[in-house]
Image (cartoon, helix red, strand yellow):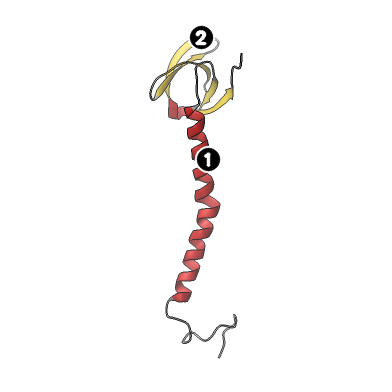
Amino acid sequence: MTSILGLASPSGLPSGLGTFILPIGLLVVLYLLMIRPQQKRQQKWQQMLGGLKPGDRVTTTGGIRGIILSIKDDSLQLRVAPDNLRIEVVKSAIASVTQDDAK
C-alpha cells in the first residue's frame, strides 16, 4: 500500500525519518528568513560604528542629533544644537550617521 505522496507505507520507511524532515526544514526556513538578515544588519551597524569620526553628524536611538566632537573607547561627545550643549553618549546608542562632513 502506498501513501498519498507515493512513498511506501510507514513500515517501509526508516523509523523516524519523516519526523526529522519537517523540523529540519523549519529550522532552515527560520534561519534564511530571520536569523541571517539580522546578522547582516548587525554587521553593517558594527561597521558604521567603526567608521565614526569627529565631525560626523549622528542620530542616537533616543532621537538626539548632534555632531561628534571626540571619540573614546566606548563613548563619544556630541555637540547638540541650538545651545551647543556637550553630551556624552555610548557608541551603542548611535542609530545612524545622518551626514558626513566631507570638506
Number of numbered labels in the structure image: 2
Residue at 42% over, 80% down: 15
Name the kind of residue labelled 1 in the image: Arg
Residue 52 seen = yes
Q: Residue furthest bottom?
A: 1
Marks 1/2: CA–CA distance: 32 Å
Point out which mark residue 60 bears.
none
Whether residue 61 can be seen here: no
Mark 2 residue crowding within 10 angstroms, few (<14) / some (14–19) / many (20+) = few
Q: Nearer the viewer, residue 58 or 85?
A: 58
Name which residue lies at 51% across and 30% down.
Answer: 48
**Residue under numbered circle 2:** 84
Residue 4 lies, with reference to residue 35, above or below; the image says below
Q: Position of residue 88 (x, y in %)?
A: 42, 18
Q: Which residue is mark 1?
A: 41
Q: Which amino acid type is marked by label 2?
A: Asn
Q: Which sits in the foreground, 90 or 44?
A: 44
As helix, strand or loop, the secondary structure at mark 1 comes to helix
Of labels 1 and 2, earlier in sequence is: 1
